[in-house]
Amino acid sequence: MWKDFFYYSKSERRAVFALSLIIVVLIIGSFVLPYFNNVSNETLVSEMDRLAFEDKLEQDIKRPFDSSYVQRMTNRRENSYRLKEFDPNTADSIELSSLGLSPFVVRNVLKYRDKGGVFRSSESFARIYGISDETYLRLKPYISISKEFVKKQESESTVSVVQSVDTLIRVFKYSEGTLVDVGMADTTELKKIPGIGTGIAKAIVSYRNRLGGFYSLDQLHEIKYITPELMKWFKLDSLNLRKISINNAGIDLLRNHPYVNFYQAKVIVEHRKKKGKIKSLSQLSLYEEFTEKDLKRLVYYFTFD
């Protein structure tokens, strides 16, 4: 009896197998389908984000350059430093960091003090390895050396200890009253002046080469970061001026000089073509491109051969 109850014909067994297969597929589908829905949704969101980003990027590219935004960001970054008076002989790492100094420079200041070094002037602070000329000039008005650390200037050259990798080396700086011939000095000699690092030294030499030499100390004021305090270290004994032949030089050579712009160079070349050689700079005074100041400066750098 029971055996007859569980007996199925061949067609019935096929139907039961098909029904079982359908049930298994439905069960598996109930677990797998939500996964594919999530993947699809995530893909859709990702695609929407990408399209939104590309649309914003395209708008940013088309938007005119906003110099005020750059200035605001620069001011915000500078204002993040809490500039206030500080004594580099006593300031701790937190105070030094708040002034905008990098961890590398802060470590060098602390190591210098640990070795027995003392900052007796604002210029001595500039000798710490890693402090750029820009950073020193920004902090200089806020450097306040306590009286206990100040003593009379010694006659011999002062020495500063600086950090180079992990080895302390000595860099000599000139003593007060030393004068450096700015017409001949290279970057190595210029860096011996307190307050002058690699940046300013290179700027002086580069500008001197572009000019063809200095004819006056006043020309140093045309270089960024040259302050009145630095001017007391310079003299000009060597007038090694390199001059340009105004009747032979092309536009490119003329315009490369700091005192000649493109339009002035073009006037010189056109004048030569139409009226022949230039015998005196007074001939250029007839053109509105040249001012009296321009001609007074250029007389030192042109020849008329």
Image (spheres, rainbow, N blue to C red):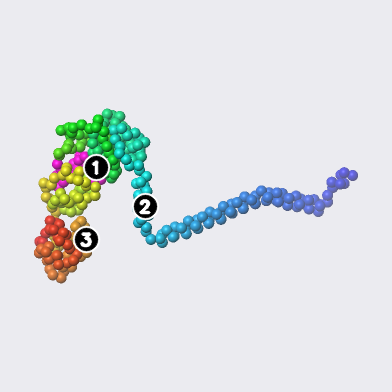
Instruction: Give the secondary structure at mark 2.
Output: helix
In the depicted structure, whether residue 139 falls above or below residue 218: above
Instruction: Give the secondary structure at mark 3.
Output: loop
Give the camera-side residue of 305 and 3.
Answer: 305
Q: CA distance from mark 1 to mark 3?
A: 30 Å
Amino acid type of the residue that numbered disc 3 sits on in the rendered structure: Asn
From the viewer's perspective, is 76 left or right of 215? right
- Is 187 within the magenta? yes
Disc number placed over residue 261 in the picture, else none? 3
Amino acid type of the residue that numbered disc 2 sits on in the rendered structure: Arg
Give the label, 2 or 1, closer to the camera: 2
**Which residue bears the numbered disc 1?**
197
Residue 2 is at least partly visible in this image: yes
**Which residue bears the numbered disc 2?**
72
In the depicted structure, whether residue 62 falls above or below residue 123: below
Crowding at label 2, few (<14), some or many (≥20) Cα neighbours within 10 Å? few
For the record, the magenta segment spans: 179-200
